[in-house]
Image (tube, rainbow, N blue to C red):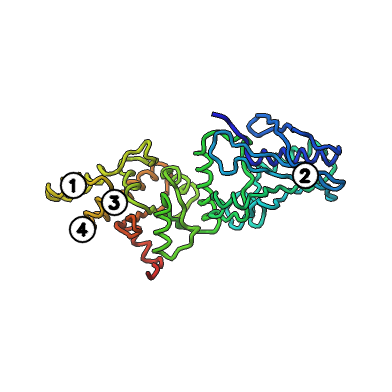
Amino acid sequence: MRFGYTTGSCATAAAKAAAIGLFTGNIPDEVEIDTPSGTKLRLKIYHKQLSADASECAVQKDAGDDPDVTNGCFVHARVERNSTQTIEIDGGEGVGHVTKPGLQVPVGHAAINPVPRRMIEGAVKEIIGNGLGLKVVISVPNGKVIGEKTFNPKLGILGGISIIGTTGIVRPMSEDAFKTSLLCGLDIAKGIGYETIVLVPGSLGERSTLNLFDIPKDQVIQISNFVGFMLDAAGKRSFKRVILAGHPGKLAKLLRGDFYTHSAVSKPANDILLEVIKLSHFPVEFLDNLKEISTIEGIVEELRISGNLSIMNGVAEMIEDKVLAYLKGKQPPAPPEVGVILFDMKGSIIGISNSAQTWLNVTKTKSL
């Protein structure tokens, strides 16, 4: 599969080309840059504008075969001489600004991450040396629209996209980038000072938690299928308590030891749930009826109709025990406390562990 290059590489190449234009009077058609991965990139330059005081040009983002919403956008760099003899780097139109603590960039600053900043500064110094100063403004004309399609609004990065990349290269697999985005949620929660976080597999868990409980949105963090990865990361950040909240179709898979719950590698949890229900010694006819139901939600509904929904509290306890055992093996000597809340597809609580109930007893529940 074809590799691409990051918005950080685009900004670096555009800044280098603009600096060449400002100091030589001619913006080149292509420039070569070094990347942290050791790969050199030669990138084409677009949208050239040159005056006596400033130079501006752009590089078009190419994500290769990676599914990236920023693919095809133009990353612009405008450079002007700076009397302070320093390289000043800022964000313009379409580059988001950080509004929440815990990220790599301080609150109030443009979302240009440290590695791209160093790349831009290094590339510009190649042209102007160490004795001169320059102001570099990075912009993405349609970045505000693109930014709404990313994790940025949830992370408190408003007004556009981020200029990112640790290697300068986009590899045609989005899993690592996705994990990095998820970790930002943990870092924001830690930066704000929360001792308890609520980890949810997806929008159902997030929506249900925020609808039912009076807690801040930043305290609820989506983890997708990366349950084990995010539990490890939460433990390393020393949160006091982790509440795992979501549909049993996902969370019951943990009872099988599947801490990566993607359907490609983790089969449906029907068999696990049925084995738990068997422990309660229901009539054979009832169990046979449950076996014919194809979804976890259908099994839950049958338990509700028959007046046996309380068994899901036991399922929540078993999931909690499994998570605790996992964390104790990964995070000695003092892993976080754990609680589990299970929701149905309508967002109602259908099961809750004792530890989660204790947490809820001191957490305000919204009046619906």
Q: Which residue is mark 2?
A: 56
Viewer-side residue, 91 vs 252: 91
Q: Which residue is mark 4?
A: 305
Q: Secondary structure at mark 1?
A: helix
Q: Which mark is residue 297?
A: 3
| Total numbered badges shown on the rendered structure | 4
Q: CA distance from mark 1 to mark 3?
A: 18 Å
Q: Nearer the viewer, mark 4 or mark 2?
A: 2
Amino acid carrying mark 1 in the image: Lys
Q: Are marks 1 and 3 in contact (CB under 8 Å)?
A: no
Amino acid carrying mark 2 in the image: Glu
Circle nearer the N terminus (1, 3): 1
Q: CA distance from mark 1 to mark 2?
A: 70 Å
Circle nearer the N terminus (4, 2): 2
What is the x, y in percent for residue 296? 28, 48
Q: CA distance from mark 4 to mark 3?
A: 12 Å
Viewer-side residue, 71 vs 189: 71
Amino acid carrying mark 4 in the image: Ile
